[in-house]
Image: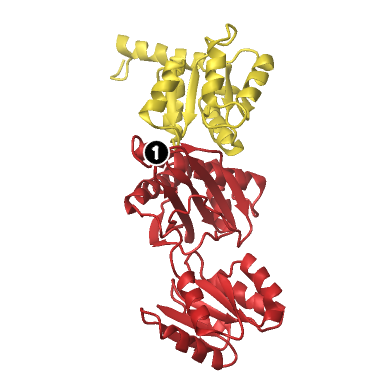
Amino acid sequence: MGSDALNVGNLDSLEKSLGAVFERKDLRFLVVDDSGTMRRIIAKCLKDIGADTVIEAADGIDGLVKLKTAGKIDVILTDWNMPNMNGLDFLKKLKADAAYKDIPVIMVTTEAEKSSVLEAIKAGAKNYVAKPFTADVLKSRVEQTLGISK
Amino acid sequence: MKAIVISEKSVLAGQVRQALSKCPAPWDVVPAPNAEKALPAIDPHSLVFLDYDLDPLVGRAALKTLLTAQDFRDVQVLLVGERSMETNMKDAVKAGAAGYVLRPLDDGALRSRAEEAVKPVGSRQKLDVRLINPFINATTEVFKTMAQMEVSRKDLFLKKNYHMFGDVSGVMGLTGVATGSVVISMPGQLACVLVGRMLGETPQADVTDSVRDGIGEMVNMIAGHAKAAFAGSEYHFTLSLPVVVTGGGHEIAHKTGAPCIVVVFEADGKEFAVQVSLSPEK
C-alpha cells in the first residue's frame, strides 16, 4: 500500500461523506417567498445540494395550503416581508401546529437587524440567512440545519 | 447656472436673457435652433427652455430627444408657448417636462418659473447627506452578491422634482419612525441583464413579468440591507412591499416632501439610478 492508503481517520471521513450522500437523498423543501425570482434562486441552490423536490409558495397562507398536500418536508425556507401572511406569522402558525412544529424553518430575509434575527429565533426559526446571500452561504445554512457535514 | 433656449427665432433667447439677468445668481444663456443642436451644450444640470409653438408631433419629438439624452441626469425642460398650445404643453408635462410658461412672456413669471424649476424638491426640510451611504453600500453589495456585477458610482445630486426616469423602476415605500421611499430606475436592457445574472440564465429580450419581479426583489434587498444601518436612529424605517413601474416619465409623489437624493451608478456599461427620499422622525 502506498501513502494514499486509508487509515482510520480516512475511513471516518469516508463514512461521513457517504452518510452525507445518503442523507441528501429524497430531500424535500418548501420555499415561501412572494418573489418568483427569489424562489427560483433558492430552488436552484437547493437542487445543487441534492434536493429532489422543491415546493414553492407565494406567502404564508399559500405555504400552509401547500403543506397540507406536500407530504414529508425536510426544511422550510421562508421570506419575512410578504403580503397576506408574513414570514414571522407563518413561522408562529407552524410552531403552534403539532403536525408542522418539528419541521426546521430557515428565515431567508432582508430583515437583517439583530432585533429581527432574535425575534425569529425566539419564534422558533432554526436558522437565518440575510439577503443578499451567496449560493455557498445558503447551501451551508441548509446543510447546517439538516445536520449534514461536508 | 446655464439656460439653453431652443427656438427657431432668436427673440426667445433675448427675452430669457433679459428675465434671468435680474436673478441674484448669474445665468449663462445659450441659444440653439433645435433639440439636436442643443444637446452638446447641455450639461447634467442645465435648465432648457423649449419653444413649444410647434407642430405637436415636432414638439413632442424634441422633448423626447432632450429627455432621452439626459439619461439619469436632472436636466429640467420648461416649455414656452401660446395659450392655444396649453393642452399640448400639459400633455408634455405628463411626459416629463418640468412645466410651461405662457406667452406673452412676463419677466417676473419667467424668472420665478426658472428659479422654481432648478430648486431641489423638499428643500424646506433639513438634508442629512449621511443617510445616503447605507443605500450606496447596499446597492453595491446586492449587485455583487446576487448578480456578480460590479457597480461604479458616477454622480450624486439632489433632485429638482420627483419625476422618475428609466424604463423600469422598483419602488419601496418606507414607513415607521422615518418615512419616504427608495427607488431604483434603469433601462430595460440593463434590467433584463441583471435579472438574467441573478437567475444564472440568458437575459430575456424584453421586460417581462419575471424581469419586473426581479427588479422588485432588488429594491427590496437594497432597502432591507440599508435598513440595518439605521437601527435605533431617527431614520429607522419599516419596509412595505415593493412596486414595479414601467414606462418613462411617470412621477412618484413623496408624501413626506423630503429632499430626494439621486445616486447614478454604472453596471455592465449602462447607467442606473437609486433615488432616496427619507424624512426623519418629527
Q: Nearer the viewer, residue B193 or B201?
A: B193
Q: Residue furthest top?
A: A98
Percent position of residue B147, x then y: 48, 45
Chain identifier for the red-coloured part of the image? B
Q: Position of residue B89 (x, y in %)?
A: 65, 74
Q: Which quadrant would residue B10 be assigned to in this image?
A: bottom right
* Residue depicted at 56% across the width and 23% down the height: A51
B38 vs B252, nearest the viewer: B252
Residue at the limit of the structure toward the left, as seen here: A3
Q: Chain of mark 1?
A: B
Q: Position of residue A29 (x, y in %)?
A: 57, 21
In the rendering, what colour is chain A? yellow
**Residue B201 seen anywhere in this rendered image of the structure:** no
**B272 with respect to B233 (left or right):** right
Residue count near mark 1 (Cα–Cα under 10 Å), binned few <14, some 14–19, many ≥20: many
Residue drawn at x 40%, y 80% is B23
Colour scheme of the picture: by chain
Considering depth in this image, is B59 or B104 the residue closer to the camera?
Answer: B104
Residue for badge 1: B236
Residue depicted at x 36% and y 55%: B127
Above or below, B119 relative to B204: below
At x 46%, y 22%, the residue is: A142
Q: Quadrant of the C terminus of chain B?
A: top left
Quadrant occupied by the N terminus of chain B: bottom left
Q: Nearer the viewer, residue B267 or B248?
A: B248
Q: Identity of the amino acid at label 1?
A: His
Name the secondary structure under disc 1.
loop
Q: In this rendering, does residue B18 appear at all?
A: yes
Q: Quadrant of residue A4?
A: top left
